[in-house]
Image (cartoon, coloured by chain):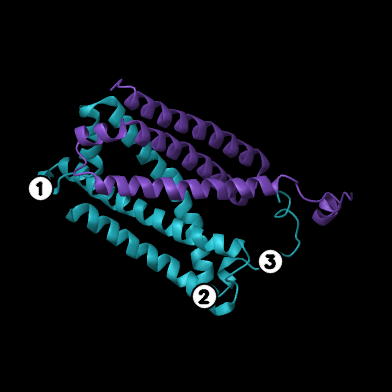
Chain colours: A purple, B cyan
Amino acid sequence: MGNGTSIGRVRGLGSAKTGPHHWLMQRFTAIGNLLLVVWLGVSLLLLPNLHYQTVIEWISAPVPATAMALLVISTFWHARMGVGVMMEDYVHEHANKFACVAALNLITFAGAAFGVFCVVRLALGGA
Amino acid sequence: MAQAGTSNRPLSPHLQIWRWGPHMAVSILHRVSGNGLAFVGLALLLWWLGALASGPAAYATFTGWVWADLSTLDWSGLGLVTSLIRLAFKVVLVGITWAFFTHAASGLRHFVLDIGAGYELNANRTWSILSPVLAVAMTAIFWALLLLR
């Protein structure tokens, strides 16, 4: 391992070894997103209107509530990986990149938890 | 990467050097639409779910901002500002559905490329053009079905 040029520092280190998992998860969640968002779009089109009572009665049933919770998990998971790649590409300074990815993780888990909680509350009749 | 800009070593030509083609356009469109969905689309999804879980009043606030009834908008004084925001929300909401169909179409294109197919010059160019065009068509069909039912 050299200590001068950029190429010298990385020569012999090989890949990070964690790429295939990221690549596969990006695609697995993409398939989930495709199925679930299409389900959401078709469901909204099939509802007679989007008034509060109509939507509540639809989404609080077991199957729509389960699909909606899965949609939240799948889309947030996929978004976390996609936005993470964007940050790794465009935020060059190490400390800023770390801060961005750390904030991304917090916001992703907070957002997904809030979304799933709302669905659970709807399904269990809290609202 | 962090040190790449600090030394005087030559850099490879960047975006502005290349002549734009449909392949480049669909590639950056995939990233832009994906990040738009992540930041704006998921925020709206959470607002919608949160409003549903919070009750009729919160849901009325949500729909009042995101899909306001145009006939009730007030265009005088401060109402001008809030009405413009409500119009902007309609553009954002349609834009989010467009971003989904665009990201889905170019994502499906990526699945084809992932299995090693579709790299022939003409086929690649054709699908690069068709992906965003189909997405616009799907967006139009979705909103037509939603608004005309």
Mark on residue B25?
A: none
User: Percent from the top left, x then y, of residue B57?
Assistant: 20, 28
**Where A30 sits versus A76, above or below?**
below
Q: Nearer the viewer, mark 2 or mark 1?
A: 2
The chain holding disc 2 is B
Image quadrant occupied by the C terminus of chain A: top left
**Where B72 sits versus B58, above or below?**
below
Which mark sits nearer the N-terminus, 2 or 1? 1
For the point 23% across and 52% down, the residue is: B146
Q: Nearer the viewer, mark 3 or mark 2?
A: 2
Q: Mark 3: which amino acid?
A: Ser
Q: Nearer the viewer, residue B127 or B73?
A: B127
Report which residue position mark 2 lands on.
B125
Mark on residue B12?
A: 3
Q: Nearer the viewer, residue B129 or B145?
A: B145
Q: Mark 1: which amino acid?
A: Ser
Which mark sits nearer the N-terminus, 1 or 3? 3
The chain holding disc 1 is B
Which mark sits nearer the N-terminus, 3 or 2? 3
CA gap, disc 3 to disc 2? 24 Å
* Picture quadrant of residue B42: top left
User: Percent from the top left, x then y, of residue B88?
Assistant: 27, 49
Mark on residue B71?
A: 1
